[in-house]
Image: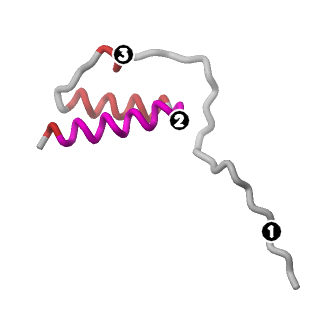
Amino acid sequence: MTSKQINALLVERLGYERRGLTDRVAMVDAALRELGYDHKYMAETETAAIEPAAEQTSIRRGKKKKI
């Protein structure tokens, strides 16, 4: 059962890593450590990038026209 959880967390971590969400990667890393999984790529690293507080979509929709 834990191997399925670890695999799911690793897939989740990869998705967050690709999108640049370092806070969420750190949360997944903490969950992996609680399950007893540790890897060299899970090292704590600091970045100088400024991240937005919330995710936003890339498409902004205009207001509907009134008839």
Label 3: how many Cα within 10 Å (few below 14, some 14–19, many 20+): few
Magenta extent? 4-20
Residue 19's tag is 2
> What residue is at 45 percent from the left and 15 percent from the top?
45
Whether label 2 touches label 1, CB < 8 Å: no
Residue name at image x 27 percent, y 18 percent: 39
Q: Earlier in the sequence, mark 2 or mark 1?
A: 2
Mark 3 or mark 2: whose residue is earlier in sequence: 2
Nearer the observer, disc 3 or disc 2?
A: 2
Indicate the amino acid at tag 1: Lys
Instruction: Find residue 56 and report its horizontal and vertical position in percent.
Output: 63, 48
The secondary structure type at the circle numbered 2 is helix
Q: Secondary structure at mark 1?
A: loop
Q: In the rendered image, which residue does mark 1 sit on?
A: 63
Pointer 3: what residue?
A: 43
Colour scheme employed for the rendering of this structure: secondary structure
